[in-house]
Amino acid sequence: MAKFKKKKSEPTVDPNASKSEPTEDISTEIPETEKSEPIPETPSGEPPISVAEKSEKDRKLNKLFWMRIALAVIAGTAATFIFEDIEGEERRWASIGFMIVIFFGTVIVAKGMKMQLPSSDRKKVVTQAIGSYVFLYLFSWIVSYTLTHLGTVSSGINI
């Protein structure tokens, strides 16, 4: 075991005082720590989750993830054609509102899946794939809009 030496000296009042004063070396031994048994990481008051329940939960969360990914691509592409008649800024806000409504629809479907989640994971129903959903929706909306209106551009690069 390593021994640590702790130096003790009186604080100096005068900043010009030299440090030639003797210092007293005091060695202290740190006792070895006892090895403790790992504590299971389940919140208090909740029974531990079995392997079958965990795999069922993971399967349902995986299903929710891929459902949101597929809906993001489908809804983003559909937004191009649904909001074709709306012009300007209103089209953008209508599409973003449509994205939010579809996302809340997936939350309702996820609650209907009756996932047995511990209280620490309850927000996974909402947060599962939210970033992927938003970015894929916007990406598919922009790409489909660009491809749809490719020939109508009066300036820029025409292909």
Image (cartoon, rainbow, N blue to C red):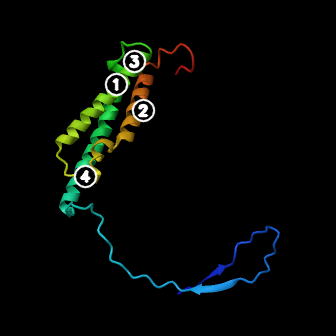
Report the residue at 27% width, 33% height from top: 104
Q: Which of pointers 4 and 2 indicates the residue nearer the eye?
A: 4
Asked where in the image residue 132 lies, by quadrant, the reply is top left
Q: Which of pointers 3 and 2 indicates the residue nearer the eye?
A: 3
Q: Mark 2 or mark 3, which is nearer the start of the sequence?
A: 3
Q: Secondary structure at mark 3?
A: helix
Do callouts 2 and 1 mark residues in contact (Cβ within 8 Å)? no
Q: CA distance from mark 4 to mark 2?
A: 34 Å
Q: Secondary structure at mark 4?
A: helix
Q: Residues within 10 Å of mark 2 (few under 14, many from 20)?
A: some
Q: Mark 3 or mark 4, which is nearer the start of the sequence?
A: 3
Q: Residues within 10 Å of mark 3 (few under 14, many from 20)?
A: some
The location of residue 4, given as percent across then percent down, is 59, 83
Q: CA distance from mark 2 to mark 1?
A: 16 Å
Say which residue label 4 marks: 119
Vertical arrangement, residue 60 with respect to residue 92, above or below: below
Do callouts 1 and 4 mark residues in contact (Cβ within 8 Å)? no
Report the residue at 66% width, 85% height from top: 25
Q: CA distance from mark 1 to mark 4?
A: 30 Å
Say which residue label 2 marks: 139
- Name which residue type carries label 3: Arg
Q: Which mark is residue 97?
A: 1
Q: Mark 1 or mark 2, which is nearer the start of the sequence?
A: 1
Q: Residues within 10 Å of mark 4 (few under 14, many from 20)?
A: few
Say which residue label 3 marks: 91
